[in-house]
Image (spheres, grey):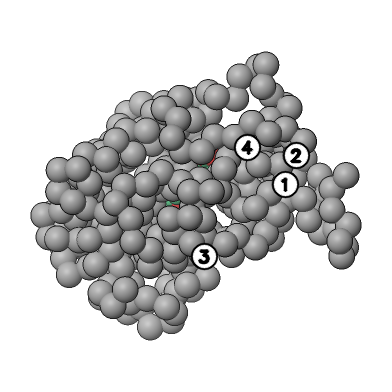
């Protein structure tokens, strides 16, 4: 990828994990509605490459995508309990504005930050907590219909559908990454669901690197580490993107302490 890459929501948790891992490897343009501090910028990114704007601002977004080859679109309200007015504006209108601008100027690829909450209602009372455990073979693989757990999940399913439309209508390559639970240094503590869908910082950076480098049409993949407890299949991400995760929440105790050597979870 020789052309610049636009990263929206660059100042947030996922954006910073990506930049910490692959910051030096791309020519970045960054967009966030909050100004980014010096230490949030990868080496070599000048203030001219930073757009402080709301992703629903069509003119600003059009300027931001001009000349870029690919976009990683993260900007939005990430709260599972976010109210409808916020997800409608930040997540649905914002994602629509981003896709419209991208196809208008001829961007080739968009990686969209979807969420586990687009399919959270598969976690029914009769399946949980068993499905969060490693001896359970229940798997979602990205071919299932959305089944959102909240209005935030509805907004992510809408983003995936917008991506489908712009792929079919305009030929844009789109990968929707249903991100699990990103935490730094250790998996979520004392939280089975979080440990089943943990995404480490290094696997996150590697996954989005693969989204930028691989060739695909329209894809939905799961964005988690290679956790023993997983109930999301990584097969599609491995096959289409070449994702090769290195981390596994089983290498940590339930309380989040690293286990020694080969001492994996019982
Ligand atoms: N952190 C996680 O474990 C997960 C995150 N995601 C998704 O990944 C994306 C990033 O999430 P995080 O980094 O955790 O959130 P965050 O809240 O840390 O970062 C979001 C960034 O986007 C910016 N932003 C929000 N609304 C904006 C708007 N309308 N215009 C421009 N900038 C805006 C914020 O200023 C912030 O810097 C979100 O779309 C979220 O739904 C999905 C699943 C899990
Ligand atoms: O989409 C998201 O999911 C993660 C995990 O959800 P949780 O309900 O198990 O905490 C969440 O932490 C993150 O904020 C959200 O954007």
Q: Residue tagged by mark 3? A: 206
Query: For mark 1, does the 10 Å Cα neighbourhood hold few (<14), some (14 to 19), or many (20 or more) residues?
Result: many
Is the residue at mark 1 in contact range of ligand 2, meaning its CB lies under 8 Å from it? no
Q: In this view, does 90 lie above or below 250?
A: above
State the CA–CA distance, disc 1 to disc 3: 19 Å
* Mark before the other along the chain sequence, 2 or 3: 2
Q: Position of residue 232 (x, y in %)?
A: 58, 40
Q: Position of residue 265 (x, y in %)?
A: 84, 48
Query: For mark 4, does the 10 Å Cα neighbourhood hold few (<14), some (14 to 19), or many (20 or more) residues?
Result: many
* Mark before the other along the chain sequence, 3 or 4: 3
Q: Contact (CB < 8 A) between labels 1 and 2?
A: yes
Q: Residue tagged by mark 2? A: 134
Quadrant containing the C terminus in the rendered view: top right
* Mark before the other along the chain sequence, 1 or 3: 3
Q: Residue tagged by mark 1? A: 228
Q: Is mark 3 on a helix, strand or loop?
A: helix
Count of residue discs: 4
Q: Which residue is drawn at the image coordinates 38% and 83% (left, top)? A: 44
State the CA–CA distance, disc 4 to disc 2: 8 Å
Is the residue at mark 3 in contact range of ligand 1, meaning its CB lies under 8 Å from it? no
Query: For mark 2, does the 10 Å Cα neighbourhood hold few (<14), some (14 to 19), or many (20 or more) residues?
Result: some
* Mark before the other along the chain sequence, 4 or 2: 2
Q: Is mark 1 on a helix, strand or loop?
A: loop
Quadrant containing the N terminus in the rendered view: bottom left
Q: Contact (CB < 8 A) between labels 4 and 1?
A: no
State the CA–CA distance, disc 3 to disc 4: 21 Å
Query: Which mark identifies residue 231?
Result: 4
Q: Where is residue 112 in the image (x, y as percent from the top left)?
A: 36, 49
Is the residue at mark 2 in contact range of ligand 2, meaning its CB lies under 8 Å from it? no
Q: Which residue is drawn at the image coordinates 38% and 67% (left, top)? A: 213
């Amino acid at each position: 990828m020789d052309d610049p890459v636009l990263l929206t929501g660059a100042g947030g948790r996922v954006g910073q994990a990506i930049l910490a891992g692959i910051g030096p490897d791309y020519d970045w343009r960054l967009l966030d509605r909050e100004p980014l501090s010096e230490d949030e910028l990868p080496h070599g990114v000048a203030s001219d490459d930073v757009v402080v704007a709301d992703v629903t601002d069509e003119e600003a977004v059009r300027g931001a995508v001009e000349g870029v080859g690919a976009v990683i679109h993260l900007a939005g309200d990430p709260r599972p309990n976010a109210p409808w007015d916020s997800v409608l504006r930040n997540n649905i209108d914002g994602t629509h504005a981003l896709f419209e601008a991208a196809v208008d100027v001829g961007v080739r690829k968009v990686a969209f930050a979807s969420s586990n909450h687009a399919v959270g209602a598969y976690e029914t009372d009769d399946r949980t907590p068993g499905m969060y455990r490693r001896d359970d073979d229940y798997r979602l693989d990205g071919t299932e219909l959305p089944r959102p757990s909240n209005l935030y999940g509805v907004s992510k399913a809408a983003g995936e559908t917008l991506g489908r439309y712009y792929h079919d209508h305009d030929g844009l390559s789109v990968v929707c990454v249903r991100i699990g639970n990103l935490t730094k240094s250790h998996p979520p503590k004392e939280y089975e669901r979080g440990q089943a869908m943990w995404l480490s910082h290094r696997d996150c950076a590697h996954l989005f690197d693969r989204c930028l480098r691989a060739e695909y049409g329209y894809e939905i993949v799961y964005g988690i580490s290679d956790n023993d407890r997983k109930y999301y299949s990584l097969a599609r991400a491995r096959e289409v993107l070449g994702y090769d995760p290195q981390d596994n929440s089983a290498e940590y105790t339930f309380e989040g302490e690293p286990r020694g050597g080969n001492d994996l979870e019982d």
